[in-house]
Amino acid sequence: MIKISTLFSPARAPAPGLKFIIALGLYSVLGCFGSVAFSADKTPGSTLVWDLSELYPNINAWEQARTATTARIKQLKHCRGELGRNAQILGKCLQLSSDIYRSLLRVYTYSFLEKDIDLGNSEARQRHNLSEELLSQYEQSSSFIEPELLKIDKIKLRKWQKQSQALNDFDFFIRNLLRNEPHILSAPEERILAAANAPLRAASTTYSILSNAEIPPAEITLGSGEQVKLTATNYAKYRGSADRSERKAVFDAFFGNLTNYQQSLASTLTGQVQAQIFEARMRRYPSALARSLAVDNIPEPVYRALVDTVNDNLDTLHRYLRLRARLMGIKEPRYYDVYPDVIDLDRQYSIEQSQELLTQALEPLGETYLDMYKAASRKPWMHVPPAEGKRSGAYAMSAAYDVHPYVLLNHNNDFDSLSTYAHEWGHVMHSLLTQQNQPFSKAEYATFIAEIASIAHELLLYKHLAENAANRDEKLFYLIEELQGLRGTFFRQTQFAEFELAIHKEVENGGALSADRLNEIYGETLKRYYGHNAGIMTIDDTYAIEWAYIPHFYRNFYVYQYATSISAAYYLMDKVLSGGERERRQYLSILEAGGSDYPYDILKKAGADMASPLIYQAVIKRCNMLMDEIELLLAPGAYQ
C-alpha cells in the first residue's frame, strides 16, 4: 500500500517565512522491532547505517555549532527597528535571519537523527531538547521581522526590490507576506491570539492523551488463543486477519470500545472545530477551510473539484469492492473485509534488491535523474535495519540544506518495505533537485506538492513489477496492491476531507456537534462511499464511530492533500510515460521549483491545473485500467 508521508515541522519559523523540510513517515506497522533477523553491517563505509559525521564529526563539534548559533541569534537584536531604513539593511537582516536558521537546522538535524536510532539514549534526547530550545529562541528573536516589514511603504518596498540584489532571494517571502497582510492583526491583537494558542490547542492535546494513554484498549482472544490488547497499532495489524470471524471480532471490539467514550471524543473534536473557526474569524477569513487553504494560496475550487470528481465516480470504488469480494469468495462483503490481503506473495526484498528494482523502475524519468538516484542511494545516507529502541516507521529528512537528506527505514525485507523504500527516495530526490536549483530561502516546498515525487516512485515501481511478474498470481498481487493503495489514499482520504468540511460547515452555520450527530454525518458519508444502500458493502452502524479513530481531523483540513498529491502524481506520470522529453521536463520542473512559488502555480505551469476534474479523473482511469487487467487475468487460460 502507498505510504503516506508529510512535511513535518516542530514550529513554523516566523522569519523569513521558512520551515524546514522533513518528510516524516506516519507511524505504521513497519516498526516490529526484533521480529526479523537482519544482520546489519555497521562497519565504516556501510550504506546500511547513516554517517552523521557528514553533519558534525563528533558531539563536541555539534556542541560548538550549537553555541555559535546561540550567539548569532543574539545578533538579530541589532536589526530590530532598522528594517525600514533602506534596502541594504533590510537585505542584510533578512540574510542574517536566514543564515542563522540554516545553521540551526543543521544542529537540529544531527540531534533529531541521533536520538531516533536509540530512543532510550537519555543523553541524545537531552541534546535534542537543547536543539528545540534553540529553535524557540530563534522564533522569539526573529518575531519582529514580519510586522516591521509590513510597516514599510509598499511603493518604497517594490522600489527597493528592483534596486537591490540583496533582496532577490527573498522576493517570494516578501510577496507571500504582503498577500497575507489583510489577515495580520494589530500588534496587541496578535499578542492576544498568541496567548490564546495553548487553550486553542487544548482539544487536540486532550484527544491525543485520551486516544494514546487514557482510554483502556479493548481486549480480544484470537483464534490462536492469544489475548491481544487492541491498541491503535494492534487494530491496524489484526484488522487484516485472514480469518473473517477474527477480523469481525477486531472491528466490533475496537469500535465498540470507542463508542463507550464517544461523548468525550465528540467534545474534543467539537473543540478542535470551534478553535479553527474562531481563528479563521479573528483573521477575517470567510471560513476555516479558506484559512487553511490560504496558507499555501490554494484556490478553493481545488478542494471542491477533488470531492465532486470522486463523488461522481464512486462506481469505480464500488467496482473494486465487488472485485475484491469475488477474489475473496465473499458473497456479502462487510466493512471489515476491506483490509485483508487478497493474494499472498511469498517473496523477500532485501535492501539491495529494493535499490535495484527502483533503479529499473525509474528509467522513464531520464538518465540524469537515474544517475543522481544511483549515486545517492549507494551513499551512507540511510539507517536501514530494525533495531531495539529505534524509532518505528520511515521518513526522509532534508533539513540540512548544506549536507544532504537522510532516510530512516525499518526494512523487514517484505513488500511494504520495498514500497516504503521507493516512497522515501522520492522525497530524497525531490529535496536534492530543489537544493540544486533553489537558494535556502526558497528550499521549503509546500505540503501540497510534497508527496508527488514519492507517489510517482511507487507508481513506477508498481508498473515495473507488474510488467515483469513471473506468474499470474504475482502480477495479480501487484495490481491489487496498487488498487488497495488507491482506495486508501485517494478515495478514503477524500471521504475524510468531505466529512471534515461537513462538520466545520455544521458549526459555521450555527449547528452543534454531538456524538450522535458526528456518527450520523460520518455514517452517511461512509455508507455512500462504500455503496451500502446499493448492496455493494454493508456498513454496520457501530462502525460510524470511526471518526473518533482518525487523528488527522485535528490537523485542520490536511487530509485532502494526500488525495491531491496522488492525483497529481498519476496525472503527471501518465503524461511522462506517454510523452517525451517535454513531459519529463515539465514533471522535473516541479521538483526543481522547491518553494519558489505557490504550489498550485508551480503545478499549473507544469501542465497540471489542480482545480480541473481532469487531474482526478487520471486516478479513476488508472483504477479502471488495473481492474480491466485483473479481470483479463482471471479469465481461463488468459495468462501464459
Image (cartoon, helix red, strand yellow):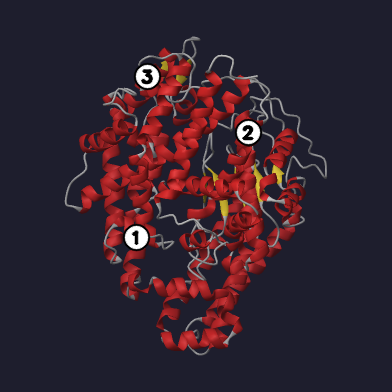
Between residue 610 and residue 407, name the one nearer to us.
610
Label 2's element? helix
- The CA span between labels 2 and 1 is 37 Å
Q: Which is more foreground, mark 2 or mark 3?
A: 3
Mark 1 belongs to which amino acid?
Arg
Residue 88 vertical placement versus 589 (above, below): below
Between residue 592 and residue 417, name the one nearer to us.
592
Q: Is tag 2's residue or tag 3's residue first in the polypeptide sequence?
A: 3
Mark 2 belongs to which amino acid?
Ser
In the image as oriented, which residue stretches furthest toward the right? 44
In the image as oriented, which residue stretches furthest toward the left? 510
Across and down, in percent, residue 80 comes to 49, 81
Residue 297 vertical placement versus 302 (above, below): below
Circle 1 residue: 291
Q: Which is more foreground, mark 3 or mark 1?
A: 3
Residue 327 vertical placement versus 586 (above, below): above
Asked whether the beta carbons under mark 2 and mark 3 sit within 8 Å of each other, the answer is no
Across and down, in percent, residue 436 comes to 68, 63
Q: Determine the residue positioned at 45% across, 71% down.
A: 176
526 sits to left or right of 21: left
Circle 2 residue: 417
Across and down, in percent, residue 183 comes to 34, 70
Label 1's element? helix
Circle 3 residue: 333
Q: Is tag 3's residue or tag 1's residue first in the polypeptide sequence?
A: 1
Asked whether the beta carbons under mark 3 and mark 1 sit within 8 Å of each other, the answer is no
Between residue 177 and residue 198, name the one nearer to us.
177
Asked whether the beta carbons under mark 2 and mark 1 sit within 8 Å of each other, the answer is no
